[in-house]
């Protein structure tokens, strides 16, 4: 069987400084050498081999296969890229065919996926190879997973703060890419790139006293000049103390809804992620001294 091995300048195995094409006379074992600007190819006849790759039992001819061991990590995955430009007539890459009769492709085969051990070679195919179909929505989720989206970074109420029954509480959060957004990331596969942008669209506050407050923004930081005014964007007024709650504090939970818009691969869509943060707050009574 003829086995072709490609040595590329990028790997440091062969480096050529000028374009050159050379052919070695066919030896008695049917070998041949072709060198181009970027690669050299050697064909040797491996005795006793009737198919598959040298030194292995898995087939890589024109697609994918697996080794005889049955181990899923040995699965061979091949992807193809049309050679551009196509090799000249007479090149070994045509495997005896003429330009126009099929086409020559760069084949990359890997074990356990193309990110594992790989072999790159030029192959002739009569018909275009089937290409991996990538769902843009899957890439969108992959982009979201890389963002490390977190729950709200609560600025108020604070665990160490002092709050009073009947006094308006202002709630707000600090804003960053991972706790509020916007946060943008991309993911690529199969020639498709999807870009996703995430931002918190609302925060639902469960106040621990049975009340729930929905805020469609980060809230407004309190200023001393506001006195006893209620927050214009996100606030709550406790009507009882936290004395009867566990540990004497109300458990406050802020749950953010991340809305993610994505597009790519000729499609667009929207995803949702939920994150939350907890804080314990003490609510006391105003003591009147007579």
Image: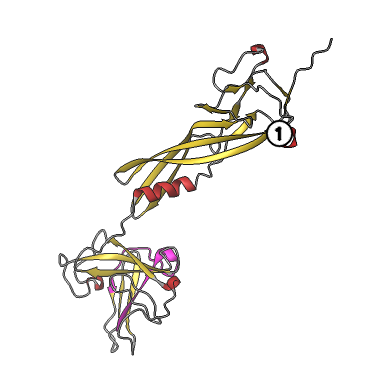
**Residue at image coords 26%, 58%:** 84
Q: Position of residue 254 (x, y in %)?
A: 58, 34
Q: Is residue 101 magenta?
A: no
Left or right placement of residue 124 versus residue 144 in this view: left
Q: Say which quarter of the image contains residue 49.
A: bottom left
Q: Position of residue 203 (x, y in %)?
A: 53, 31
Q: Position of residue 34 (x, y in %)?
A: 30, 73
Location of the N terminus (image quadrant): bottom left
Which element is circle 1 on? Answer: loop
The vertical placement of 188 against 119, above or below, is: above
Q: Is residue 21 magenta?
A: yes
Left or right placement of residue 247 versus residue 233 in this view: right
Q: Position of residue 132 (x, y in %)?
A: 31, 59
Query: Which residue position is annotated with label 1?
Result: 245
Q: Say which quarter of the image contains residue 112.
A: bottom left
What residue range appears in magenta? 1-22
Location of the C terminus (image quadrant): top right
The vertical placement of 91 against 283, above or below, is: below
The vertical placement of 37 against 66, above or below, is: above
The vertical placement of 49 against 82, above or below, is: below
């Amino acid at each position: 069987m003829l086995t072709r091995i490609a040595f590329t300048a990028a790997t440091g195995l062969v480096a050529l400084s000028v374009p050159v094409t050379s052919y070695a006379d066919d030896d008695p074992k049917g070998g041949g050498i072709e060198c181009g600007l970027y690669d050299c190819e050697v064909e040797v006849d491996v005795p006793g081999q009737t198919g598959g790759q040298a030194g292995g039992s898995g087939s890589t001819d024109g697609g994918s296969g697996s080794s005889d061991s049955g181990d899923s990590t040995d699965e061979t995955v091949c992807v193809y890229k049309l050679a551009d430009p196509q090799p000249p007539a007479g090149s070994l890459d045509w495997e005896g065919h003429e330009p126009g009769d099929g086409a020559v492709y760069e084949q990359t085969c890997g074990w356990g996926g193309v990110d594992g051990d790989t072999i790159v070679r030029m192959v002739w195919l009569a018909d275009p190879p089937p290409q991996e179909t990538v769902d843009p929505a899957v890439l969108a989720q992959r982009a979201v997973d890389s963002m490390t989206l977190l729950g709200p970074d609560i600025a108020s109420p604070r665990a160490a703060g002092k709050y009073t029954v009947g006094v308006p509480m202002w709630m707000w959060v600090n804003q960053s890419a991972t706790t509020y957004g916007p946060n943008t990331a991309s993911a690529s596969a199969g020639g498709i790139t999807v870009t996703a942008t995430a931002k918190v669209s609302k925060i639902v506050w469960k106040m621990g006293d049975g009340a729930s407050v929905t805020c469609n923004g980060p809230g407004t930081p309190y200023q001393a000049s506001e006195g006893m005014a209620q927050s214009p964007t996100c606030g709550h007024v406790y009507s009882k103390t936290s004395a009867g709650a566990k540990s004497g504090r109300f458990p406050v939970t802020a749950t953010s809804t991340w809305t993610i818009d994505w597009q790519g691969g000729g499609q667009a869509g929207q995803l949702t992620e939920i994150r939350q943060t907890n804080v314990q707050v003490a609510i006391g009574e105003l003591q009147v001294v007579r």
